[in-house]
Amino acid sequence: MVLPGICILLIPLFDFLFSSLKKYTGIQIPNLIAWLVNRFDNLEEIALIWLLLVFSWSLFQRYQQLQKTIAQEALAKND
């Protein structure tokens, strides 16, 4: 679930790699990479929001699991 957010944050690395390839070999930067680089500011915001939501959801799930475990242990002690 975290992978989409991380992939978007890797766009500057792809830009650097393809720019270096273009500089030394003359290979053109793929249109997709150029498009992503031009829209990186918006994509970065989306990725950070996505990561925030995923991590918040996972913390919430962990909290619920801990509450359930504590309740089960309390019931076991009362029996």
Image: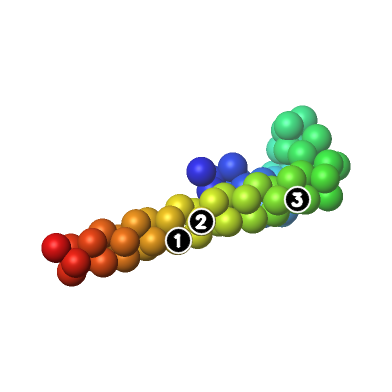
Q: Amino acid at mark 3?
A: Glu
Asked whether 4 or 40 is in front, the reply is 4
Viewer-nearest residue: 62 or 46: 62
Taking the image as drawn, is residue 21 in sight?
A: no
As drawn, the residue found furthest toward the top would be 31
For label 1, the crowd category at 10 Å Cα-Cα, with few meaning under 14, some 14 to 19 and many 20 or more, is few
Residue 60's disc is 2
CA–CA distance between discs 1 and 2? 5 Å
Cα–Cα span, label 2 and label 3: 24 Å
Q: Quadrant of the C terminus?
A: bottom left
Mark whose residue sits in front, 1 or 3: 1
Q: Secondary structure at mark 2?
A: helix
Residue under numbered circle 3:
44
Q: How is the image coloured?
A: rainbow
Q: Type of residue at label 1?
A: Tyr
Marks 1 and 2 in Cβ contact (< 8 Å): yes
Q: Residues within 10 Å of mark 3 (few under 14, many from 20)?
A: some
Badge 1 is on which residue?
A: 63
Which amino acid type is marked by label 2?
Answer: Phe
